[in-house]
Image (tube, rainbow, N blue to C red):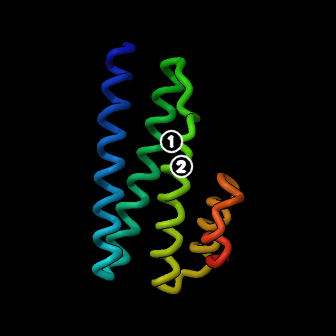
Amino acid sequence: RNAQADMAKVLAAHLIVELSFAGNAQYRQSDYNAAIRRYEEAINLCEESQGVAEDAGRDMSDASTQQNVTRLRYNLARALHRLDRWSEAREQATAVLRLDPAYLNAYALR
């Protein structure tokens, strides 16, 4: 079971990075809806992989996991803002600030 949890964590981490890169590329191409989908997938995967680690008795609340979620939620907020989805962008920016009150760029999206 521990080997499976380790493999799941490695695969999830790789997929999160790939989804983030894809979202960033789509954002740069002004394909904000696609970017939003990639960021949401990556956030969901972060949360799912955290649950898998917790089920295996491991702590995934480390700094890198929190930084990933913070960055992904900020990127999601930016994409939502570009589509004039103000309240959703504000919700994501608020979530960013709950995770990291020093993430100054998120204040501009509130």
Residue in the picture at 33% in, 15% down: 3
**Residue lying at 64% horizontally and 62% vertically, measured from the top left:** 103
The residues tagged by marks 1 and 2 sit, at their Cα atoms, a distance apart of 5 Å
Q: Secondary structure at mark 2?
A: helix
Residue 11 horizontal side relative to residue 63, left or right = left
Query: Looking at the image, which residue is at 62% across and 69% down?
Result: 106
Viewer-proximal residue, 6 or 34?
A: 6
The spot of residue 27 in percent (x, y) is: 35, 75
Is the residue under label 2 in contact with that under label 1 (CB below 8 Å)?
Answer: yes
User: Label 2, on which residue?
Assistant: 67
**Which residue lies at the image location 30% right of the left edge and 42% below the top edge?**
14
Q: Nearer the viewer, residue 110 or 83?
A: 110
Q: Judge left or right: residue 18 versus residue 82.
A: left
Quarter where residue 100 is shown: bottom right
Packing grade of label 2 (10 A; few <14, some 14-19, many >=20) is some
Please tell me in which quadrant of the rendered image residue 15 appears: top left
Image mark for residue 93: none
In the image, residue 45 above or below residue 88: above
